[in-house]
Amino acid sequence: MLQEYQRAREDAKVEIARARDRLRERTEQEKLRIRQQIISQLLREEEKLHNLATSGSRCTSSDGSLSSGGTSGYNSSPALPSQLQSPDSVQHKVRN
C-alpha cells in the first residue's frame, strides 16, 4: 500500500513538472506574440509619422507658406520600405 502511495506521489510530481514546463512555454510564446504585436504597432506608427513628415514638407514652401503642389494631406507618399525594420529584425534587437 505504501509503495502504491509513493508511486502515485511520484507520478503526480512528474505530471506537475510537465504542466509547469508547458505553462512556461506558453508564457514565453505569449510574451513573444505581444512583443511582435507591439513592434508591428510601432512600425505602423512610424510609417504614419513618416507620411506626415513627408507630406508636411511638401505642403509648405521654404518661407513657411502653403504651396500648391500636386500632393498634400495624409498618406500622400508611402513610407520607404527600406527605412522600416521588419518585426523579426526588431525582435532580434530587443532580445540582445
Image (cartoon, rainbow, N blue to C red):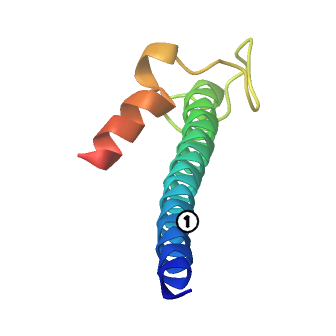
* Quadrant in the rendering for residue 53: top right
* Quadrant in the rendering for residue 48: top right
How busy is the neighbourhood of tag 1: few (under 14 within 10 Å), some, or many (20 plus)? Answer: few
- The picture places residue 60, in percent across and down from the top left corner, at 60, 32
- The picture places residue 89, in percent across and down from the top left corner, at 38, 29
**Which residue sits furthest front?**
1
Foreground of the two, 59 or 44: 44
Against 4, is 22 above or below?
Answer: above
- The picture places residue 14, in percent across and down from the top left corner, at 48, 66
Local secondary structure at mark 1: helix
**Which residue sits furthest bottom?**
2
Against 56, is 38 above or below?
Answer: below
- The picture places residue 95, in percent across and down from the top left corner, at 30, 47
Left or right of residue 68: residue 4: left
What's under tag 1, amino acid-wise? Answer: Glu
**Which residue sits furthest top?**
70
Give the labeled residue for mark 1: 15
* Quadrant in the rendering for residue 88: top left
Residue at position x 50%, y 73% from top?
7
Against 36, is 84 above or below?
Answer: above
Residue at position x 59%, y 33% from top?
47
Quadrant location, the N terminus: bottom right
Left or right of residue 9: residue 60: right
Residue at position x 51%, y 16% from top?
81
Residue at position x 40%, y 39% from top?
91
Foreground of the two, 87 or 29: 29
Tally of numbered tags = 1
Against 64, is 5 above or below?
Answer: below
Foreground of the two, 63 or 58: 58
